[in-house]
Image (cartoon, rainbow, N blue to C red):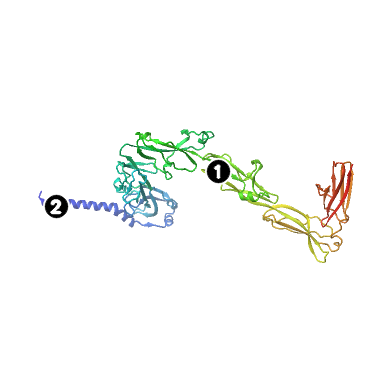
Amino acid sequence: MTAETTRLSIFGMKHHYKLKILINIFLVVLLPFVFLTCSPMIEDFNSLVKENGSDNIQFTVEYYADGVDTDEVDYSTPIKASHLEIGSIDSFSSPQDFSGFTYQSKSIVQDSNGNYILKLIYRRKNITLSFDISESPNGAQYRDGSTIYSITRKFGASTENSIPTQDDMTFTDPDSYFLAGWENSLGETCSIEQFFEQTFPAANATYFAKWVLTSNGANYNVQYWFEKWDLGNGKHYLETNSVDEENFNRSQYAQGENATEPSQKMAEIGSEITVSIPEYVGFTAIDPESLVISDDSDANIIKVYYYRKEITLTYKSDSDDAVTNGAQNGEYGVFTEANGGGTSKTVTGYYGDTIALKYTTSDVEKSTFRKTWECTSWSPAPANETFPAVNEVYTAQWNQTHALYTVKYYFEDTTSGTSIWVEDEETYSEKGLVGQMTTVSAAAQDSVEGYYAPTVTNVTIVAEATSVVRVEYKSKASTSSGMINPGTTDITLTVEVTGTTITASCTRSGTNITSCTWYLNGVAQSGTSSSFTKNDVSAGTYTLFVVAKDGYAEYTASATVTVQ
């Protein structure tokens, strides 16, 4: 073969490979693009359903996303195999979630054979990987002076040239420790020999450098153990003051974002190590003893045990201000007698244990002579099933339901030539629903000689218990003379002594006595009747005094009584 023939053969082979490459590009890149541009886009699915005469239609579902190195959709590599479905537009409303991807849009096309294809388009998430060397034992820094290096690329992108190496760092003490690998916050590790994941993962991650001593060193490991929930009486650390490892769980979450140090470190053999202890809400750590590092890394373990705190839940029947300011008139909530009374109750248990004793709104009450309340809730809402991680205080919340209203009587006085209203001493009080109108009836009031039937003015009951119902008796002109301000002698007091019993009665001509107050030797006696009886009276001389009322005036009389 001549040189010229050889040259032509090579030339022909080059063009053959060029043609093959062009054909592959057309099939992989251009053909899907041509298909998409030539296929009709269907935007109105309702019209599609109408044309087919059914709510359901057969279609193929395909899943695509942008490429790792471009913003264009990569139709050559679906992110999930296509599949056939039969359904309505509702089938397209909730696309499937894929880790590392974000759903963006959908389109429905029809191919040359009349088949419908649903294309779901996704975007790759931007993922950030961070590499933390801040806990290095040899003063390591990146060459820009930082201790955390971060890089962001799309999910699935290659990690090549993304992961820092020891060559990217500077060291205060370069000869004592070397970089052994990386460990993330979930405890997942990779060594230098592995070096690393080939593509960016589906979620952000932070990796911590793992170091190894160049000589005379060994690893040590810190383990975190947490007391189990609801162990029952007699099994809690606080009740036994001893660690039974069966009652503790080995937990990895202590190595997460709340941890103050990586789970594994290196130290010189023979050195004594103490560790800082991270805090966790609801737990108290038992301070571990120091560890002397041996040459056996597997034996170098520091165990930190956490026991659950004892938690107190306090139920208060009312606010502190209400108890302090309402102490004189009793306007503050208390627990019912069935619950032992008082203004405060406590329930204790260990964090995470089941709450066996709970107080409800029906366990408290609040009522005075003037007002009545209903407990509507606790603030804040009490823990329902298990003891929380911290002590809590629950205060009863009250809504006033009833309040006192007073009924007062007024009599018209015309003796001065003008009409004035004189308030009578007789009143009575009742409770009613706040916000409702009182229902005092005029027909239910007693008639008074010389006065017309009363006029009653009902009012809306207010929470302050200051509502007053006014009952007015208007004077009759023909009988009013002589009825106003009668003399105190217009009363008859009759007294009789039988053995050791004193009986008496009080009468007045013209009107009926409505009530009497009796006094024996200055001591008020029970009862308001116009008749009086006192049994088993000791021998001696007594003064009997009576104050009588007939609805518009007050009268007094007295008598001396001797009991043999």
**Amino acid at the residue labelled 2:** Leu
State the image coordinates of residue 107 (x, y, percent, origin top left): 38, 55
Closer to us: 525 or 453: 525
Residue, disc 2: 8
State the image coordinates of residue 59 (x, y, percent, origin top left): 39, 50
Marks 1 and 2 in Cβ contact (< 8 Å): no
Real-space Cα separation, disc 1 to disc 2, in angstroms = 88 Å
Earlier-in-chain disc, 1 versus 2: 2
In the image, residue 53 above or below residue 539: below
Answer with left or right where residue 535 lies relative to residue 349: right
In the image, residue 445 above or below residue 286: below
Give the secondary structure at mark 2: helix
Q: Which mark is on residue 57?
A: none
Count neighbours of disc 2 (C-alpha within 10 A) and say few if under 14, some if 14 to 19, many if 20 or more.
few
Residue, disc 1: 384
State the image coordinates of residue 48 (x, y, percent, origin top left): 41, 56
Residue that lies at the very extreme toward the left in this rendered image: 2
Give the secondary structure at mark 1: loop
Count neighbours of disc 1 (C-alpha within 10 A) and say few if under 14, some if 14 to 19, many if 20 or more.
few
Regarding residue 448, the answer to whether it shows in the image is yes
Answer with left or right where residue 191 lies relative to residue 468: left
Regarding residue 319, the answer to whether it shows in the image is no
Quadrant of the frame with the C terminus: top right
State the image coordinates of residue 49 (x, y, percent, origin top left): 43, 55
Closer to us: 249 or 308: 308
Closer to us: 254 or 521: 521
**Amino acid at the residue labelled 1:** Asn
